[in-house]
Amino acid sequence: MTACGCNDWHTTQRAAMLRRQGQRVPIPRAVLEGATAGISRRDFLRNGAIATITVYGASMLSWGRIWEAAAAQAATPGGVTDPIIVSIFLDGGNDGLNTLLPVDAQNLAAYQQARNYIALDPNDCLTLAGPAATPDFRWNPAATGFKQLYDAGKMAVIPAVDYLPPDLSHFHSRAFWQAGELDPNPATGWLGRWVDQNGDPDNPLQALSVDWTLQGSMKSAANPVAVLTSPQSAQYDLNGVWTDEPLMVQTLGDLAQRSAKNAPMAAADKAVGGAVDVANQLAGLGSTTIPPNGLGYGTTGFDERMSTLAWLIRSNLGARVACLSFDDGFDFHDNQVNRQADCLSSLGQTLAAFQADLEAHGIADRVLTMVWSEFGRRVDDNDSGGGGTDHGAGGLAMVIGTHVKPGIASPFPGIRTVDLDGNGNLKVPVDYRQIYTELLGNWMGTDPAAVIPNAASFSPLALVA
Amino acid sequence: MANQYPTLPRNSTAAHYRRLLWRCGFSGSDKQISHYRTLGLNGAIEKLLDPAAPARLSGPAPRVNGGPLDPANVWGHDTLWWLDRMVRSHNQLEERMTLNLHDHFATSNAGVGNIRHMLRQNGLLRSHAVGSFLDLVTRLTHDPAMLLWLNGADSNKWAPNENYARELMELFCLGNDPGLEAATFGLWKQSKMYTQADIHAAALALTGWRYDWNNTQKANPTFYDSSWHATGSKTIFGHTGTWDWQDVVRLVIRHPNHAPFLAWKLWSYFIPTPPPKSAMQMMVGNYLSSGYKLKPLLRVILRHPAMYQALDAPDLVKGPIVFVASTLRMTGQFITEDAWAWLLDAMGQVPFYPPNVSGWDQGAAWLNTNSAHAYWQTTDYLIRDTVGDPGQESATDAVSRAVAALAHPWVSNGARAKLEGYAQAFFDAHSFPSNGQHLLGSHERVERQRVLRALILAGPDGFLS
């Protein structure tokens, strides 16, 4: 069926994971089994590896040094109370209006007038109850996980966030959000710069993309960050070769050892050499029970990655920032209602389970989870394939955790025609960098100005309690 | 003004032709190189730029699982169908440009859901591979796959959908990266960038095309319905009129940022270092004076000294499709099994399924430890049935035989020495004395050949052309 081009890139995400620049290194078995309490450095180095991470930014770290750094960090007193930011990207531009309906009389009337094809019935929608109860909004009926978190006082909602002037290109907006500045070709991401400023020069596990690729937000200039891929074989073999496989693998590694004549050649050497190193390091593969039972996780890849992340955080390996993309895209130019409901239902379930997971392991007080999308959608809908929306401004973001100031955290600009900008989009009362300065300053306890250009002009939005 | 072209190097060696054939097609065997050398470099370029119609295909037609391919109905046969053309077509540049244009217009069957439409679009790209870009964009604008992919088929005067209008400007024709201004020496201008108002007006003007959902198996179920077209006056790039879809194409192609954007992009498919100013000027000048034809633009690229720089240090990375098609040609194989379809999936590049509307990442994106292993795995399949018993041979002869069996690809001197080192070390470890001399057993003789060929193909040199 028809779908927007920019929405379908997840269909080949398995493929995409195979073609990113980075170095794959093994994770010792002890690490993945969570046996890090009291683990010695020697244990780290001795145990066989059962999964791999791909390390970016650290050109030539040895495995031993990486795991020593992780072990050292785990053993540091106070190292296990450091705050953590988890950033979750909803790719494609989620429609905030159909996620969180404005149901005050004026806006509801305007909503029903603007949305001829995809308007939700407010009677089916979910109330916002609990300590920050409000009659002004209701959740999409599928967003039961959001309601659970909100009603428990663990969610702050930013209902219309963007930058000025809004650029409705996926690629620009995504790049801007990831960079923390309005630069479409950023060299680093905002969390990557935080890692460069505040992180460890040796421990890639401080910054985790539990994802197919390295999210732009985490691109660092100096300190290492990592991509975690699922456990898989990385051994080198060849059909019909058994007399001397070690000599084959050794020669392949040798071929990569030379002074390269240009950058692509150096990259090819590094890729082949790194792959051979990994093959040599990997011992027997095992499997882990992720996601664990009883916490409410679903069965999607996103559930698996989020529970992997919860597990890595509680393993005290020095994780401080993490990035993930949701499995599916939100670019619903057509056939929106059902597709968005599926996404919101699944996303909400996973977020609630992730929070429950953190709480069950006593680490919830260390983690804030930010959920964002590159923009919102047009207020007026269209009738493409049963109803969809074009790119718009003023998207919806959420911050989740036990330390959030619960409730609607910023003004809603309104959707009556007179309230909109000249292009039929929401006005932008909050810049996305006001979320960043709040999280960097009041949550991480670091100087936002060292990470966000011109930080002083983005006054922190009160989100952290 | 007459078209301007760079002067070709006075003396050309086999290495010049190898470079040209590898970048304008799918490998250049020693046989092809000697054939093209008889034409001279100018003649070789002109032959590549002048494809016969229809293309001559040499070698046996594909047969998989005992029958011919059924690309419209059987999984993976679409991939195999195109791969076969890459392997057998005498119009190598036409086929390579079709792949480049597929990357550029990045339509995915993940959104189209109709492989017949994808194959139709593929034919459209092929027929314009070195032809009129204006005509290509005109036809693509109402091409059934494109109308489904970017929601043109859902767009109408009551609810215009901006998806195609936006990508027509952003990704296909004009670009929106401010860095282009410096990269094109000011030929592309940020001050001339399109606006959201231009996108919306163009979306309105493009309305009228429809898709007959009751006849999806027709070769072309699209039709123009003027009652769906927004007839009013629109302003696009400052030009006001009652524009329709053809006017949009005309206005976009005549936009001053179009020619420099396209020239800069097409150059990157052949030469990974940025074009110098004189080349940019020639490409843009020739393209405009020819009425938006690709051939005079491509001729600048193929004749440019940058194309023949550092012939012993190739720097263009082979993507997975190029790697597989080339290796089949190098080893004299044809499409006889369907493994290539899933191997390309594992390598991260499935034709007809680009990851998003901006196509595949190029260049160094293919060089990482994950892909290094995937290329090796594919190489294992690619040479599986091609290695016979070489008999007793010296280490030097073994390497020469392996290079020859692959039709003499580029192998760096350093790599050659290491391969000979492998062959000798293998012999020293596994030969046995017999009648006063040392011999290798029959399995060992084959194993050594097999390993040498895999090391040439999937060692670091194998990633570059």
Image: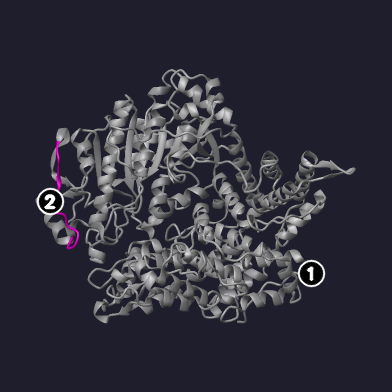
Residue situated in front as seen by the camera: A14 or A322: A14
Q: Quadrant where the N terminus of chain A lies?
A: bottom left
User: x and y percent of residue A268 in the render?
Assistant: 63, 48
> In percent of the image, x 29 and y 54: which residue is there?
A393
The verdict on residue B163 being magenta is no
Disc on res. A122: 2
Residue situated in front as seen by the camera: B379 or A344: B379
Magenta segment boundaries in residue numbering? A115-129
Q: Residue furthest front?
A: B435
Q: Secondary structure at mark 2?
A: helix
Disc on res. B11: 1
Q: Secondary structure at mark 1?
A: loop
Could you tell whether A200 is left or right of B161 in the image? Answer: right
The kind of residue tagged 1 is Asn
**Magenta span main SS:** loop
The kind of residue tagged 2 is Pro
The part of the image, by quadrant, that contains residue B276 is bottom right
> In percent of the image, x 40 and y 49: which residue is there?
A176
User: x and y percent of residue A433 in the render?
Assistant: 35, 43
Disc on res. B354: none
